[in-house]
Amino acid sequence: MPNVRVGLLGADGNEIQKIDTPPARIRLSPGETTTFIAIVDNPSALARNVKVRFAN
């Protein structure tokens, strides 16, 4: 599984900060789920939304 990317978005929808974090499990069978934890140190006060996706 790829890392999970958590992006903080400004009011205009553009990403202003991001963090990539590994999932708790590397392999999943069909239908299985996993978790992740992402901690953004010093998040921008300009952040208005969050976008979660797989990192490239």
Image (cartoon, rainbow, N blue to C red):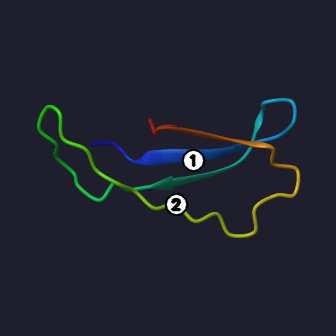
Mark 1 lies on a secondary structure that is strand
> How far apart in space, not on screen, are marks 2 and 1 (Cα)?
7 Å
For the residues labelled 2 and 1, say whether their Cβ atoms are less than 8 Å apart.
yes
**Residue labelled with disc 1:** 6
Q: How many marks?
A: 2
Q: Position of residue 49 (x, y in %)?
A: 73, 41
Estimate how packed mark 1 is, as few (under 14), some (14 to 19) or many (20 or more) residues with alpha carbons within 10 Å: many
| Image quarter (top left, top right, bottom left or bottom right) of the N terminus | top left
The residue under label 1 is which amino acid type?
Val
Most distant residue in the bottom direction: 41
Name the foreground residue: 3 vs 31: 31
**Residue labelled with disc 2:** 38
Side (left or right) of 53 relative to 39? left
- The residue positioned 78% from the left and 33% from the top of the image is 14
Side (left or right) of 41 relative to 53? right
Residue 52 drawn above or below residue 21: above
The residue under label 2 is which amino acid type?
Ala
Side (left or right) of 31 relative to 12? left
| Image quarter (top left, top right, bottom left or bottom right) of the C terminus | top left
Q: Position of residue 19 (x, y in %)?
A: 58, 54
Estimate how packed mark 2 is, as few (under 14), some (14 to 19) or many (20 or more) residues with alpha carbons within 10 Å: some
Q: Position of residue 26 (x, y in %)?
A: 22, 51
Name the foreground residue: 37 vs 17: 37
- The residue positioned 44% from the left and 46% from the top of the image is 4
- The residue positioned 57% from the left and 47% from the top of the image is 6
Residue 23 drawn above or below residue 42: above
Residue 41 drawn above or below residue 30: below
Q: Quadrant of residue 35?
A: bottom left
